[in-house]
Amino acid sequence: MTIKVAIVEDEKQIRESLAILIDGSVGFSCIDTYESAEAAIAGIPAAKPDVVLMDIHLPEKDGITCITELKPKCPEIQFLMCTSFEDTDSVFRALKAGATGYLTKTTPPSKILDAIVEVFKGGSPMSSHIARKVVLSFGTENNAHVELEKLSIREKEILHLLSQGLRYKEIADKLFLSTETVRTHIRNIYEKLQVNSRTEALNKTFSK
Amino acid sequence: MKTTAILLISCSLLLFSCKKDSISRQRKSVGKQQIEKWYNTAKSVELPLDSIAAYAAKMENAAIKQPNEYKAMAAYIRGVYYSGNSTYELAAKSFEKGLLLLGKSKADTLKAKIYNALGSNYKTRGDYPKAFGNLYKSLRIYEKKHNNVGICSVQTAICEVYFQKDDIKSAKEHIDIALKALEKEKSNPSWLAAAHLSANIYGMGGDFQKALEIDREGIRISDSINLPKLKSPFLDNKANCFFYTNQLDSAEYYFNECLKIDLSGGNKKQIADSYSNLAQVNAVKKNFAKAEQFAFQSIDLLKSIDGKPNLGKSYSILTDIYADQGEFQKALEAHNAQYLNYKAMIAEKEAASLAEFQIVYETQQKENKIQLLRKENKIKNLHIAEQNARMFWLVVSFLLLIAGVLIAGYFRKRGRELKNLLEREKAVRETEEHERIRMARDIHDDLGSGLSKINLLSEIISRKSEHLPEIRNSSESVKETAKRMTENMRDLIWALHPENMTIANFVARMREYTSDYLEDFPVVIRYDIPETLPELPISKENHRELFMVVKETLNNISKHAIASEVFFSVALSDDELQITIQDNGTGFDSTENVAGNGLRNMKNRLSAIGGTFGINSSNSGTTVSVAIKLSEKN
């Protein structure tokens, strides 16, 4: 089963090299590439890729705005953010906006393909830094008006272990779960994160 | 009686204070003279770097009690040292410090000199706008003072910038101005330097006639002032002109003349250069035995002074010599030696630029702290003075009510102004901090996309050259280097964010790193880490050293150990954090050179930060343990 991938990246050489890499690998096909957020917003809903590799830094609108606009239109598409180094602030904002995972631009190419597969299968890679930021984000309950989606006990456990640096398999072993279940829980945590950020945004607009 | 006594006493007191005054005045002028003497020696003669550093340190010490002009002289010499050491960032900082100290002083010639040096510094780093900016500032001062030597020197530097930018036309224009400025003083070293550059420019452009003409004049003048050392660059230029027009016997003759002068001068790098030139000429003339001999003389000298950049050239000449004779085995060996030298140079450059980055950042932090402390002290002192004055005036205002109220009001206003000033300074500093972070972010983004290009493109090259093992090896090597540079950058960036530096965060990162590193190896990793770790801060040095030890140990395990199990444990007590990594591999002989050096290094670095390092190895496994002390500062 071939995974259809689209690339949104403003640097020509990186964009073309990624396209060659993905197209030239068995099981993947690069169906389209876009140079800017505007082009992506116009083209992606029609092209319907399975996974989109999106650079955070784009010329006019940035990658995060792009996801915010595209995700409601195409909820089944998985967005993988590309950052320069683990710039945790940008990654966190991207995750809140609707991305399902992230890659650093300097990841070895074989791991890029692995990440695309994982995200396609329903996984959401998370590092210990991000886990810490997520914990903090759910920790601040300073909004009395609106019900913020809280984490279940299971999800809190998993997040805690993640922030200590354990990998998925280790967490699965420790909590007597399957790795798949852990992956699903993490996916849920991401989605709650996105809901929270949307609610906060709404709240800010209304409480003015 | 009484009055005479008083008169006598007051007279002698007066005389004594006068004498004391003149003694202290004399001492001051001796100090100033000394600094000026050191300055003149350090700037004019070609000294070895260590001497220049020593002069700079002496001047800095002596200048502490002297006016700013002398501190600026010390800063200039310090900058010259850093330039000689190739740490150009630090050199620029010293020069800029010197300019700041001179401010609006009238020491124009010194200012012009520093602008000139700063301009050349920016040229070396490729920042042409800043280079021109500073050079023109220097030129304006020299022109105002009709200082022809200065004008010649700056115009030469401006020519060098155009030359580096490949703008030959502008380069020629400016060197001609430089030469004209001192045409009545051709025996001045600045004119000779300009002439040599001019000969270079014409020679590189193929106009050998003109180049040789200039060389002839340069040699004539150097002979007339009896300074054979100044002849050498012209002889070298002549030799090159002959070499490129295939007049090999003349080329050999002039390179030999150069060698004679270099041997008497004793500068090993120049001697090695001359040897390698002679090797090249003889190779082209097919005198292979002689060529080989010269090449080896050059290589041996360069090895003794660790001259890596020039070693590459010498090895390359040797390779060609063997290849031309058909001795391909030896040619390959020489080529390998060149490649190894190149790799070592890159590694050094990496470490140096990383270290420089680190030093610049740390120096910046320290400077900020010192400035802040000074400001705080100033405010504190003003406060105390203020309080005393108020007490005094309160007593007086008891008798002069209106005057007392007015004056108390005045002091309160001053206090407010000081507070505003402090807040304004704080705001300035915050903006500077933001600017710095923004710049760092820009550099960081640029590096990131550069490195990712390298990664992707080299992967594509690797795939396309599966049947060309030579190319594949080179591209794998490029990938490895890019990967290592990425890791280093990531560590540096991570370390620049203070919120990352807690013990809990650090251990989590170590755990992730270890799992990641050993992911593709057939080892089972067991972790023994306490459930809760404190969010206490950990210092940058501790963090770096511990990380290095973990990296190095994992490296050894993956490359040498052949282990099936790795045990990673963390122990925390009141005053110590300990990390232990144990494997069940084949162990190693601790006298083995490769592992031995790395380990000795680790031991030293850890004891330097007050930590401990221990390693135990047998053929049933190796245990590495490292511990750091936890104080309130960590």
Image: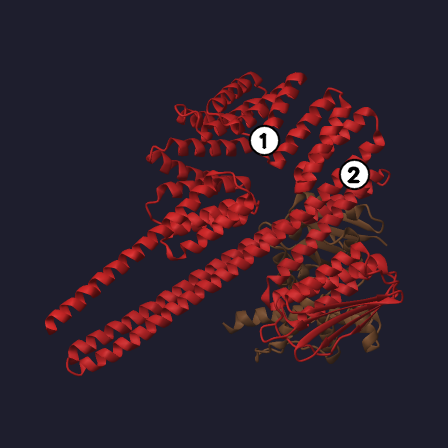
Q: Nearer the viewer, residue A169 or B410?
A: B410
Q: Nearer the viewer, residue B221 or B582?
A: B221
Q: Position of residue B546 (x, y in %)?
A: 69, 66
- Name the residue: 57% across, 80% down: A144
Label 1 neighbour load within 10 Å: few <14, some 14-19, many 20+: few
- For the N terminus of chain B, give its image quadrant: bottom left
Chain shown in brown: A
Q: Amino acid at mark 2?
A: Asn
Q: Which mark is residue B264?
A: 1
Count of number-bearing discs? 2
Give the distance between the C-alpha atoms of the residues marked 1 and 2, in whole angstroms.
Answer: 33 Å
Label 2 neighbour load within 10 Å: few <14, some 14-19, many 20+: some
Q: Amino acid at mark 1?
A: Ser
- Name the residue: 35% across, 42% down: B108
Q: Nearer the viewer, residue A107 or B553?
A: B553
Label 1 resides on the chain identified as: B
**Are circles 1 and 2 on residues that touch, CB within 8 Å?**
no
Q: Which residue is mark 2?
A: B336
Instruction: Determine if residue B319 is in view.
Output: yes
Q: Position of residue B241 (x, y in %)?
A: 61, 20
- Name the residue: 84% across, 28% down: B327
Instruction: Determine if residue A100 is in view.
Output: no
Label 2 resides on the chain identified as: B
Q: Nearer the viewer, mark 1 or mark 2?
A: 1
